[in-house]
Amino acid sequence: MAVNQRPTSPRSPVTLGSERLLATGALDGARVGVVANPASVDHAFRHIADRVAEQPGVTLAALFGPQHGFHADVQDNMIETGHARHPRLGVPVHSLYSDTREPTAEMLDGLDLLVIDLQDVGTRVYTYAWTMANCLRAARRAGLRVVVCDRPNPIGGEAVEGPVLDPAYASFVGQLAIPLRHGLTIGELARLFNGHFGIGADLEVVPLGGWSRAMHHDEAMAPWVIPSPNLPTLDSALVYPGMVLLEGTLLSEGRGTTRPFELAGAPGIDPDRLAGGLNALGLPGVHFRPAAFEPTFQKHARRSCGGCQIHVTDRRAFRPVRTGVALLQACRRAAPERFAWREPPYEYEHERMPIDILAGSDALRRALDADRPAVDIAAGWDADVARFAAARTPFLLY
């Protein structure tokens, strides 16, 4: 094998938005800012910042990083304290999860174009979409054009599920009224935010080539680079829309293990009883395996936790939000004396309960406190989800 040979990948049915953009020469003569992180790569694992910098006649003038940083090396809830300069490319790197979550006028000064190339994971509370929304707002004020390079929704674009955000509970983990699992690509989200929710920026979305809504990330043969420190695999992304709700409790969601969001539990929970009760529910597309684990950091660090591992057996039948709610209820019933809601602060929120800003209202917390059956809780989402599904239709690209 030749030394320094570029990596190759199996022929993919999908062309990424960034690949299509850079093949057109549309950036010629422009001073460009790029919003990206390590997952912003093409099929040869070349980063978009390097690709833009090497384009003849194009000036890479600034880089912007979302939560976890431009290098995705910062853990959750770690507010970044400053900005930097890229050591190799020699351009400023602005943090958008710091003293500001929106590009300032000074950061955008001198740019002709803002390119956004972020890997979303199909869940409302994943903050990269809201960083994009903030960039659209800032660009509108600055009169700056925005190009969003589309990427696959790794968990597919067919299923829509979960509670829709009540605007009274808007936060940086949910600014606009969309469901917990929205079933959109990041480019479609940009179109929805800009049109249906009225941001009104000068926006262009470069669509994917060859992607269909039924495709999961591996079926699209798209490159997988961990988009954030605790979503290492597609398996973790599949369960994330429901299991992220555990962040609003004192249960471990598996952070500090090699299987974040797939493992769940706490000290004192009987794994066999928990997994057996969950399997008896007959939830579609999932099996719960009794498990014990010891997180190395975060909740219950260095303590043995009893719980379960979620194994998705049928991706298309699996409903992660319904599953997450059922798991919360099962843990509460299995060890009521050990179950508690997490107190603030959470992200940038210092007053409201974390579970409420994750769920998008206090309705889920109140329903679980009243021990309403999980199946009834899930049925309560249907009308809002149907209205959202109709509203999103004009903004679909695939």
Image (cartoon, helix red, strand yellow):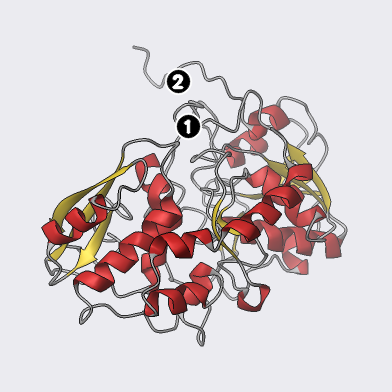
The x, y position of residue 395, in whole percent, is 76, 44
In terms of secondary structure, where does tag 2 sit?
loop
Instruction: Tell me if label 2 and label 1 are in contact, CB under 8 Å.
Output: yes
Quadrant occupied by the C terminus = top right
Query: Gap between marks 2 and 1, in whole Å?
Result: 8 Å
Which quadrant of the view contains residue 271? bottom left
- Residue 384 in the figure: left or right of residue 271: right
Categorize mark 1 by other alpha carbons within 10 Å: few (<14), some (14-19), many (20+): some
The one nearer the camera, 166 or 189, is: 166
Q: Residue furthest right?
A: 143
Task: Name the kind of residue labelled 2 in the image.
Answer: Ser
Q: Nearer the viewer, residue 362 or 172?
A: 362
From this viewpoint, is residue 81 visible?
no
Task: Pick whichever, 352 or 294, lies toward us.
Answer: 352
Label 1 sits on residue: 223
Q: Kindly identify which residue carries mark 2.
A: 9
Q: Position of residue 33 (x, y in %)?
A: 70, 50
Q: Earlier in the sequence, mark 2 or mark 1?
A: 2
Image-based side of 194 in relation to 81, left or right: right
Identify the disc placed on residue 202: none
Residue 7: in sight, yes or no?
Answer: yes
Q: Amino acid at mark 1?
A: Pro
Q: Quarter of the image containing the N terminus?
A: top left
Tell me the crowding category of disc 2: few under 14, some 14 to 19, or many 20 or more residues within 10 angstroms, Cα based. few
Is 71 situated above or below 222?
below
